[in-house]
Amino acid sequence: MKSARILVAGAVLSAAPLTACSGGGDVGPEQQVDASALVQVTPAGSTNVDPALPVVITAQHGGHLTDVTVVADGGRQVAGKLAADGASWRSTGPLAAGTHYTVKVQAADGDGTGRGGVQKGFTTLTAAATLTATLTPGDKAVYGVGEPITVALSHPVHDQAARQVVERGLSVRSTPSVTGSWYWVDDSTLHFRPKDYWPTHATVQASFDLGGAKVQDGLYGGAPAAVGFRTGDKMFALTDAGSDYMSVYRNGEKIRSIPITTGKPGFSTRNGIKVVLEQQQEVFMNSSTVGIAADSPNAYHLDVYWDTRVTWSGEYVHAAPWSEGSQGVSNVSHGCTGMSTGNAEWFYDNFRRGDIVQVVNSLGHQMEPFGNGFGDWNLAWSDWIKGSALGRTVTTQPATTDPANAPAAGAAASVASSVGYLRPRA
């Protein structure tokens, strides 16, 4: 942190003299005055200034302010408002902790014949902790229309007022525009989803930038972050565990009907809407990882191909050549959706992360909204809005740049290349 200093304390900044003519005679040049006598700047100190306090500048002795700027060393200008009578200015934007600011003021005396300027520097105290965020998806790839935006905070935020500060520092842009809302999954996690699915072939951007604002005692906004991605076609798979067929739709048009098998009694597949999480061409599946003992008649240890994951607990859409005789007939799996190798490879090639798989007519329980993948779409919209600390919807402004080339504007690029999933290809 830079040492605190007054850059030009009470200095007079000269202005070009003004002259005027009239039918009578000459009027003398405008008089330069000592602006330090005309202006009071708060905070008065130069070090360890509380960033939660506003900057207030007041004209003295009947004078008025003509120009005010408060700028951090990094170039970020603090927003503020000048009173209608010009007698005072007050910051409306937050100050960041551990930051040096320069205040520049131009003022005039009461009768308007004298002008001058004053410049002052001060440094805010260093925060005990700063709040940063990891946003996903962060690889600027193409995703399905069901992909939510997620935010993982570096520190838990429980207090409702503090959560509101965080939520105000989050921004979502998209082209086309959508109506959506944030949902606090827990003290450290937020999700954003539209009321309906994202539009096809949309550009989506999300950013986190608190401008250093105080979140709660000892915790201030840290480095900003931004991500961007695009959506592709709307790929939707309707898995009917009653008929043992999957209907696949692209942009609302049915393009394929696939015989399948889902979970047998005791292992019934979850009902509800799921979102593709990742894909792998080959996965070694070991039943002991899902609580099935090695000596159980239901145990399995085998390589499985063309795997599209929809829950973190191990539910996939995958090739199941061993059960082709039951596909389209009965449910014999341990909870996954099995199909022929050819159909599984086709599914793998046509679906990507963020695409939608919905299961109906199963004896299984409902898909969890959170914690086992993205079950966000199983919450009614009215319930989703209740998860916002601000209790409001967001109508997105147009995206500012192509995320294939740059992250969202308005926040520094802090995008981890490891965040986000690029689908492996055959």
Image: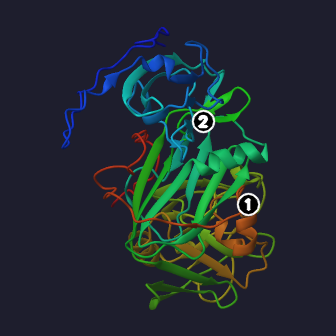
Q: Which residue is drawn at 38% across and 56% down?
A: 424
Q: Residue at x 49, y 41 (%)?
A: 79
Per the image, the residue denoted by label 1 is 387
Q: Residue 106 placed where, x, y %?
A: 40, 29
- Of residues 318 and 35, the one drawn nearer to the viewer in this rendering: 35
Q: How far apart are marks 1 and 2 (CA)?
A: 23 Å
Secondary structure at numbered mark 1: loop
Secondary structure at numbered mark 2: loop
Q: Is residue 77 visible from the viewing direction of this image? A: no
Q: Is residue 136 left or right of residue 415?
A: right
Disc assigned to residue 213: 2
Q: In this view, does 411 lie above or below 171?
A: above
Q: Which amino acid does label 2 sit on?
A: Ala
Q: Residue at x 50, y 10 (%)?
A: 4
Q: Is residue 66 visible from the viewing direction of this image? A: yes
Q: Residue 150 placed where, x, y %?
A: 57, 53
The number of numbered badges drawn on the structure is 2
Q: Residue 339 placed where, x, y %?
A: 53, 77
Q: Which of marks 1 and 2 is nearer the N terminus?
A: 2
Q: Residue furthest front?
A: 24
Q: Residue at x 54, y 37 (%)?
A: 87
